[in-house]
Amino acid sequence: MSLKNRNLSEAGLAALHGLRFLTREKSFLRELSLVFLAFIALAIRVNLFSITLLIISFIILSFEAINTAIERLCDFIHPGIDQNIKAIKDVSASAIFILLIFFFCVFVLWAFSIF
């Protein structure tokens, strides 16, 4: 069977294999802690900020998965040091950094909202 024509259960298993791979990445585990922080914020006080924190934390995890795939693909295509590959990896990582800044800003707003 072609990999493109998989049924839903096979696609789900492939996604779970991908998640298992991601759990070995330090950066993914570090950003997974943001999901737990968002759930704690939600447990303390449900408001727009805590809901936004939860949504952003899952978006960050998704971007981390994409970033990991991009980095692995770049390493596969060009295993050595290359300035173009470095630029691709840096731009990919900057997307996560921008989201982390946004998460921090919303977290500060949430913290001020509970007082």
Image: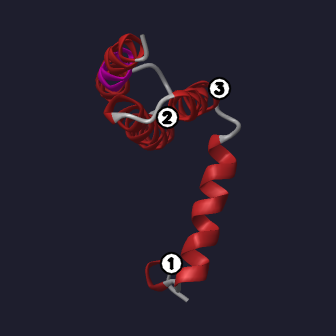
Q: Amino acid at mark 2?
A: Asp
Report the mark closest to the observer, 3 or 2.
Answer: 3
Query: What is the distance, in whole Å, between disc 1 and disc 3 at their CAs?
Result: 29 Å
Would you call the spot at circle 2 few (<14 residues within 10 Å), some (14-19), or many (20 or more)?
some
Which residue is tagged 3? 26
Predominant SS along the magenta part: helix
Decide if residue 30 is on the left or right side of residue 76.
Answer: right
Q: Quadrant of the N terminus?
A: bottom right
Q: Amino acid at mark 3?
A: Lys
Mark 3–mark 2 CB contact (< 8 Å): no
Which residue is located at x 45 percent, y 85 percent?
Answer: 5
**Residue numbers of the magenta segment:** 98-104
Q: Residue 3, labelled with which disc?
A: 1
Residue occupying image coordinates x 51% and y 31%: 38
Asked if residue 80 lies in the magenta stretch, the reply is: no
Q: Is 100 inside the magenta-drawn segment?
A: yes
Spatial separation of the CA atoms under disc 3 and disc 2? 18 Å
Q: Nearer the viewer, residue 89 or 10?
A: 10
| Residue to which mark 2 is pinned | 75
Q: Residue 39 appears in which quarter of the rendering?
A: top right
Local SS, label 2: helix
- Comparing marks 1 and 3, which lies closer to the viewer? 3
Q: Earlier in the sequence, mark 3 or mark 2?
A: 3
Disc 1 residue crowd, few under 14, some 14–19, many 20+, Cα 10 Å = few
Amino acid type, callout 1: Leu
Residue most toward the bottom? Answer: 1
In which quarter of the view is residue 88 placed?
top left
Q: What crowding class fits label 3: few (fewer than 14 Cα within 10 Å), some (14-19), or many (20 or more)?
A: few
Residue 90: image x %, image y %? 34, 20
